[in-house]
């Protein structure tokens, strides 16, 4: 049960991020109103950690789910709690941990589905990640290097 659940969580993660990236440029107010819904993915991620323990699966799932939860935490901290404009200012001290968690989290969804569920699920998540990156680049706020 864990593998399809993990794959579905990866699909939801990619779907939310693609949607958020696509609306943030022209519908920023809408993104600010509904963007918090993305953080609800923490609930199934925590449930998946319990599934890992219950089904005695590889601890790699727990590691990648922990990275995903850390990404959600840093996203919430930067964007919703402290309201740091780290994307616009490009301060490497704030940007590096965020980008590392973002890449690691997406890598985890792709590689775990690829290795432990099916090749096709890994290819689907990889394709969505590529679309996610393109949407992110195209709609990224203008930055000033600090």
Image (cartoon, grey):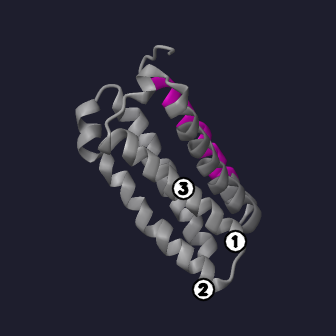
Residue 139 lies in quadrant: top left
Q: Name the residue under label 1.
A: 59
Q: Earlier in the sequence, mark 1 or mark 2?
A: 2
Proximity of marks 1 and 2: CB atoms separated by less than 8 Å: no
Q: Main secondary structure of the magenta part?
A: helix
Q: Earlier in the sequence, mark 1 or mark 3?
A: 1
Q: Is residue 130 magenta?
A: yes
Q: Is residue 94 magenta?
A: no
Q: Mark 3 points at which residue?
A: 68
Residue appearing at x 47%, y 56% in the figure: 12
**Crowdedness of circle 1 by 10 Å Cα count: few (<14), some, many (20+)?**
few
In three-dimensional space, the C-alpha distance between marks 1 and 3, rounded to whole angstroms, equals 14 Å
Give the image location of residue 88, x and y in percent.
42, 22
In this view, 81 is above or below 59: above
Proximity of marks 1 and 3: CB atoms separated by less than 8 Å: no
In three-dimensional space, the C-alpha distance between marks 2 and 3, rounded to whole angstroms, equals 20 Å
Does residue 113 show up? yes
Give the image location of residue 49, x and y in percent.
55, 73
Residue appearing at x 28%, y 30% in the figure: 27
Which residues are the magenta region? 123-139
Give the image location of residue 58, x and y in percent.
72, 73
**Crowdedness of circle 3 by 10 Å Cα count: few (<14), some, many (20+)?**
many
Residue appearing at x 53%, y 31% in the figure: 93
**Tag count in the figure?**
3
Q: Mark 2 points at which residue?
A: 54
Residue 39 lies in quadrant: bottom left
């Amino acid at each position: 049960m864990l593998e399809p659940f993990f794959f579905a969580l990866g699909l939801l993660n990619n779907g939310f991020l693609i949607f958020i990236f696509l609306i943030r440029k022209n519908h920023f107010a809408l993104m600010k109103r509904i963007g918090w819904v993305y953080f609800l993915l923490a609930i199934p991620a925590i449930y998946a950690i319990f599934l890992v323990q219950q089904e005695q699966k590889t601890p790699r799932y727990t590691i990648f789910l922990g990275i995903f939860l850390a990404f959600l935490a840093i996203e919430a901290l930067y964007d919703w709690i402290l309201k740091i404009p780290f994307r616009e200012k490009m301060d490497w001290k704030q940007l590096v941990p965020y980008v590392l968690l973002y890449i690691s989290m997406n890598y985890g969804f792709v590689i775990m589905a690829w290795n432990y569920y099916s090749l096709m699920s890994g290819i689907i998540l990889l394709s969505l990640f590529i679309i996610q990156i393109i949407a992110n680049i195209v709609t990224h706020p203008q930055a000033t290097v600090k």
